[in-house]
Image: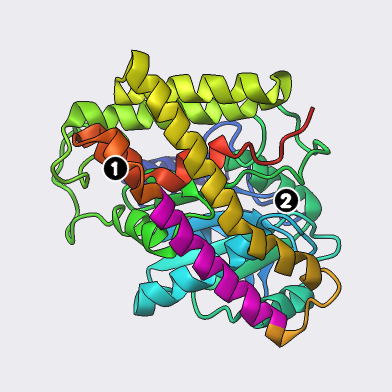
Amino acid sequence: MMLRAGLVVLLAVALALLGIVGVDAPGAARDDGAGAPAWRGRFPNVLLQAHDGRRVRFYDDLVRGRTVALNFMYVECEGTCPGVTTNLVEVQRELGSRAGRDILLLCMTLQPERDTPERLRDYARRYGAGPGLLFLTGRPADLDLLRHALGFSTPGAPAGDADWKQHTGLLRLGNDRFNWWTACPSLSAPAEVCRRIRSLDGPPSPPPAGPPEFPMGNPFARLDGVPARDAMALEKFGDALDRLHLIRSTLELPQYQEQLYARIAQFLDVKGDAAVALRDALQRVSADCAEAAAPVERIRAQLRDNEDDPRLLEAYRAAWQTCLAERARAFRKLEGVLGPGPRQRLFLENASRWLYFLEGHSWER
């Protein structure tokens, strides 16, 4: 009997070394059948339920081998969620047959106690969501784990922190096959979100063996015509905006905005009078964009008491499209101030991102 047990152990070890069977790493979380989530790398493989009734594992059934856009929302949200959902519906339509096949847009609820699959199904129907755009709920503890693991919470905050309604205004975009990840503002124009998603497409065949130039994949490979130094500066600039926004509650609004202007000027390498002119132009653009968003806010206020009114919903979608067009016109006014250059081009192409930070969303003292 002992000999047989020893042979079984040796066979298991041999198969593991050959890569035929897997062996859990020490301390790795496993699904023990009692509700404890397994992990796939850094992804909690929690059990979720989609608005269409399917029960799915987050990594195995949704993320594995696909390109995904990740978003957190909840049905009763009266802030950015309605606009983001409208945006994602347009993104799903623009992606065409790829949506639901190799690209999924995943919206996890922040209020799973209330957002049942039935309620999410009504929400999806109300916004006209099509294939590839999924609204997901599950156990509160599992969704809270997902939110923290995916970076949708304040770094260092404990799991279960009560500030979940202050969810980030960013979409996490990733290609699981190549482990390439990026982000963009949730309210970016649908065409811009689609461009970011497609920028994660890898080569049609597996990459050649050997260490890549970038261990996590080259995030700048598809910035055609942009010097690598400027592309890397854009990445650093985005990180600086994220860090500044995280500490906004420790700053007065004017102080926060001045620090933001300084970071923009540093990225664009402008000083003195040119930096002052840039700040004035940015303030005008911000005011124009706020004016463009005013009709959206008015209709949103009416929707709070009439969320099923189809005329209001259609007016809301139309108002968002008009707002996006007005914002694009406001951004074009900056061209004369910025002038030519690769960083100036990158700044304009990422206008919706820095505008999000300039507007000081969810400002709280």
Question: Quadrant of the image for the C terminus?
Answer: top right
Please tell me which residue is depicted at 67% across the width and 26% down the height of the picture: 253
Region rendered in magenta:
312-330
Q: Is residue 217 in view from this perspective?
A: no
User: Would you place residue 186 above or below residue 61 in this image?
Assistant: above
Could you tell me the amino acid type at mark 1?
Glu
x 53%, y 55%: residue: 187
Tell me if residue 209 is in the magenta stretch.
no
Q: From this view, report whether residue 195 is shown above or below residue 153.
A: below
Direction from residue 111 to residue 181 in the image, left or right? left
In the figure, 334 relative to 265: above or below? below
Q: Mark 1 points at which residue?
A: 335
Q: Mark 2 points at which residue?
A: 142
Vertical arrangement, residue 285 with respect to residue 199, above or below: above
Residue 212 at x, y = what percent?
A: 20, 35
Residue at the spot 69% in from the left edge and 19% down from the top edge: 251
x and y percentages locating residue 203 in the rendered image = 18, 56
- Element type where label 1 sits in the image: helix
Task: Identify which amino acid the numbered label 2 is placed on.
Answer: Asp
Q: Is the magenta stretch mostly helix, strand or loop?
A: helix
Q: In which quarter of the image is residue 133?
A: bottom right
Q: Where is residue 254 in the image (x, y as percent from the top left)?
A: 64, 23
- The tag on residue 22 is none
Earlier along the polypeptide chain: callout 1 or callout 2?
2
Cα gap from disc 1 to disc 2, whole angstroms: 46 Å
